[in-house]
């Protein structure tokens, strides 16, 4: 009497649902440019400025996605502030407080959109982006 030996799996053989032996259907690659444009859109949304005014440089931060962000800060001009002093108070705090709040929003949104762990986010405020003046009819 001989014992039956189990058949070895043939890695070249097709598997159900078109899967290869690794259990994956293929590869998805996201280019650095696509990731950069995506994070620039996130930063623009968080700061409330046009995407064209935002620059993001990406780097590896110990396996996480590190960002160097250059963006204008939404704030009233001196003339707008003189006309409406509450506009400055309603802006959201000091420059540093506003940058820190934005950093938290960028981290959460970028992580959600890209699926990446977000590491260090350096923010450089490059100027002022004044709100649009309302025209009276």
Image (cartoon, rainbow, N blue to C red):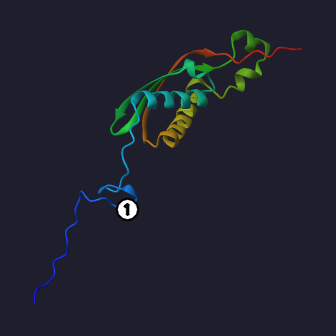
Tell which residue pokes out farthest to the top in this image: 79
Q: Is residue 36 above or below residue 137?
A: below
Left or right placement of residue 98 versus residue 85 in this view: left
Left or right placement of residue 29 versus residue 83 in this view: left
Image coords of residue 123 (percent x, y): 49, 25
Comparing 114 with 103, the one in front is 114
Image coords of residue 131 (percent x, y): 70, 18
Image coords of residue 40 (percent x, y): 51, 27
Q: State the residue position of label 1.
A: 16
Image coords of residue 13 (percent x, y): 26, 59
Residue 91 figure quarter: top right
Residue lying at 59% horizontally and 31% vertically, measured from the top left = 46
Residue 98 figure quarter: top right
Tell which residue pokes out farthest to the bottom in this image: 1
Comparing 8 with 89, the one in front is 8
Residue lying at 76% horizontally and 18% vertically, measured from the top left = 85
How many marks are shown on the rendered structure?
A: 1
Residue 100 figure quarter: top right
| SS category of the residue bearing label 1 | helix
Left or right placement of residue 40 versus residue 128 in this view: left
* Quadrant holding the N terminus: bottom left
Q: Residues within 10 Å of mark 1 (few under 14, many from 20)?
A: few
Q: Is residue 55 above or below residue 109?
A: above
Tell which residue pokes out farthest to the right in this image: 137
Comparing 76 with 4, the one in front is 4
* Quadrant holding the C terminus: top right
């Amino acid at each position: 009497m001989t014992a039956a030996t189990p058949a070895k799996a043939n890695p070249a053989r097709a598997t159900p649902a078109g899967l290869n032996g690794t259990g994956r259907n293929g590869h998805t690659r996201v280019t650095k440019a696509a990731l950069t444009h995506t994070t620039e859109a996130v930063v623009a949304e968080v700061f409330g400025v046009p995407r064209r005014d935002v620059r993001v440089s990406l780097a590896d931060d110990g396996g996480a996605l590190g960002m160097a962000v250059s963006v204008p800060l939404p704030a009233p001009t001196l003339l707008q502030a003189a006309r409406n002093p509450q506009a400055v108070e309603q802006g959201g705090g000091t420059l540093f407080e506003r940058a820190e709040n934005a950093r938290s929003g960028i981290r959460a949104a970028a992580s959600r959109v890209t699926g990446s762990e977000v590491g260090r986010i350096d923010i450089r405020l490059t100027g002022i982006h004044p709100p649009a003046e309302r025209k009276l009819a």
